[in-house]
Image (tube, rainbow, N blue to C red):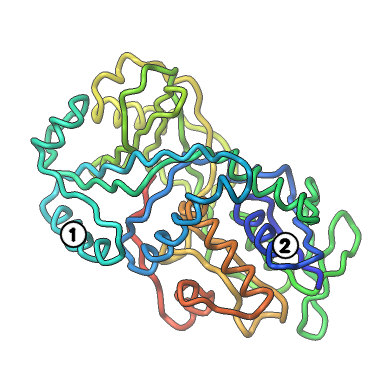
Amino acid sequence: MSIAVVGGGVIGLAIAHYLLKLGAENVVVYEMRYVGSGSSTRNAGHFRVHFWAPENARFAVESRKMFLRLGSELGWNPLIELNGYLFLLYDEGVLRAYRRANQTWSSLGVPGKIMDVDEVGERYPYLNLEGVIGAFFGPQDGQFHHDFITFGYYSSVLKRGGRVLEYAKVDRIVVEDGRVRGVEVRGGFREHEKVVVAAGGWSNEVLRTCGVELPLVPERKEIGVTEPVARFIEPLIINTKLDGYLTQSIRGEIMGSVDYPPAPNVMKLTNTITWITRFAKMAVETIPALRHVRLMRVWSGFYVVTPDHSHVMGRDPDWPEGLYVATGFSGHGFMLAPLTGKLMAEHILYDKIHTLMEPFLPTRFKEGRLVKETMVIG
């Protein structure tokens, strides 16, 4: 069986890795630019298990277990640190929502800690706590190095006999008599029995060539880092009032983003003075000492957003036979990549629909079974 994976980011490479690990022999990854050139090497490099939707929380818990084993599986050290996420809370209603959700998270084996403002101040004295009424700390959450995971999967695909073709844009998915026959690349036809589209913000561009379209909206997101300073920030800090986050890298750079300005359907990877101004205000208001630190570099990437802010994986029986998707992760793709890759590989090879995967099938949009997720950071 010949399988084409469209997209050479972490999702596509993870799918290819697990396909080959399960015994597939002819797997080709097509990447229109270079490996990881979409959002896989443009993100903040963090993972969490705490989501409002129980379906997403369960999925994330299992993906985290795989994350912690990736070093031995891939032979690349992902530099994982379990330094947690700290959500600063300013509203009584939001605090109550975290208390309720923590009951669900506790039932899944990943309880967090509700902290009062005095405890937050004692543990994190560098924070500005004006208006803060409490916080939620998720100790199971953490950070990783996205390059080492992306290229760990890439290296594994090559070692297992797969092929990764860079600068090989898929111009069309070829369908005949209701079945996938292959793809057109660089003006030539390449035969494949199955095609899985994992092309992030470009997924619909590829899917439309065979008459399929999903409710996906790419949103440009901006991010920046400061000059390195001595490490003092432990967790990823989320300011829920200003819709921003801050963290510190292994090298000491302060990295973060703020969800402003909205940029839906914007595919151009540019940066704006509007974002820089808002980010600087959020950073200094959250950690006043940052007023003395210089911003060194900014860049942008994409969230590929669905109507319910949950991902799409699998296939619709009404689609051409042999067509699959894994996209629309709404900013959560990297942290969910290991489990997505494994479950998609089983689905493609064995027609298996795992219970953790079932809520995210593309049929949910027409069936009205949305997995509504509002805990989207950045």
* Quadrant showing the C terminus: top left
Disc 2 residue type (three-letter): Leu
Name which residue lies at 14% across and 31% down.
121
189 relative to 124, above or below: below
Query: Residue 10's spot in the image, x, y percent?
Result: 61, 51
Q: Residues within 10 Å of mark 1 (few under 14, many from 20)?
A: few
Q: Distance between the residues labelled 1 and 2?
A: 42 Å
Residue at the disc numbered 1: 97
Q: Is residue 260 above or below residue 224?
A: below
Whole-percent x, y for residue 112 in the image: 24, 52
**Residue placed furthest toward the right:** 188
Total tally of numbered discs in the picture:
2
Tell me which residue sits at (62%, 75%) in the image: 347
Secondary structure type for disc 2: helix
Instruction: Tell me if mark 2 has few (under 14), some (14-19) or many (20+) residues whose alpha carbon lies within 10 angstroms of its own.
Output: many
Q: Earlier in the sequence, mark 1 or mark 2?
A: 2
Element carrying mark 1: helix
The circle drawn on residue 20 is 2
Q: Quadrant of the N terminus?
A: bottom right
Is 327 placed left or right of 253 in the picture?
A: right
178, 271: nearer the viewer = 178
Above or below, comparing residue 266 to residue 119 in the picture: below
Q: Position of residue 49 (x, y in %)?
A: 36, 55
Q: In this view, does 375 lie to the left or right of 8?
A: left
Nearest to viewer (mark 1 / mark 2) = 2
| Residue drawn at 52 percent across, 79 percent down | 363
